[in-house]
Amino acid sequence: MFTGIITAQGEVRTITHAGDSQDLRVTIGTPPEFLAAQGGTAIGASIACSGCCLTATALGPDWFAVDVSGESVSRTTLGGWAPGTRINLERALRLGDELGGHMVSGHVDGLGEITAITPEQGSLRIGVRVPAPLHRYIAAKGSVAIDGISLTVNEVAGQDFGVNIIPHTAEHTTLGLRRPGDAVHIEIDMLARYVARLSET
């Protein structure tokens, strides 16, 4: 489990394919303090990489490697990553940690598209369009994770919704690098998922 509070940005260093399959091994460079936090990182640790929960399979002082299945590649933007791609990083939540965002599982529900980015009184208003199956789970003043970042929904209109990000978020996450037309990972609020499921019974 994660909170959607990004603690570092990483950069893809290498990508290798596993034979003829779509499986990938990705090496991600990080600030050394990110891996050293909370008593250090062990092989097998879960790390949210732009909202995707991935397992560290190899480690160095300022890098870690993850193996990505073809299934994950087909359902996320990971297949478009290349050396130099910047990604949001968050370590898994530990009992007793501050829950500063909302409960995030690291399981991407689908891809959204940035439709607009507009300056607004020092912050940025970002418009996002999601696939039809997901829009019913997004509500004004509810929570959503975009590329692993916990955000509050401002407004909803059909398959479109808007969020605001403050300068700190733009500077310390990859949202500050996004442009209209970019694809982003969407994870809906798990409470919304269960409420919707209960309403079907």
Image (cartoon, rainbow, N blue to C red):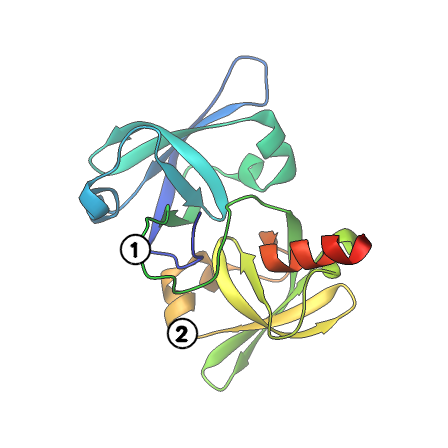
Residue 7, given in percent of the width and then of the height, sits at 33, 56
Hey, which quadrant is residue 72 in on the image?
top right
Name the residue: 58% across, 42% down: 77
Mark carried by residue 12: none
Disc 1 is placed on an element classified as loop
Q: Earlier in the sequence, mark 1 or mark 2?
A: 1
Name the residue: 55% across, 26% down: 69
Disc 2 is placed on an element classified as helix
Name the residue tied to disc 1: 96
Q: Within 10 Å of the Cα at label 1, are there few (<14), some (14-19), or many (20+) other Cα atoms? A: few
The CA span between labels 1 and 2 is 28 Å
Residue 100, given in percent of the width and then of the height, sits at 39, 65
Name the residue tied to disc 2: 167
Q: Can residue 87 be seen at all in this image of the molecule?
A: yes
Name the residue: 64% across, 47% down: 109
Of 129 and 140, which appears nearest the observer? 140
Q: Amino acid at mark 1?
A: Gly
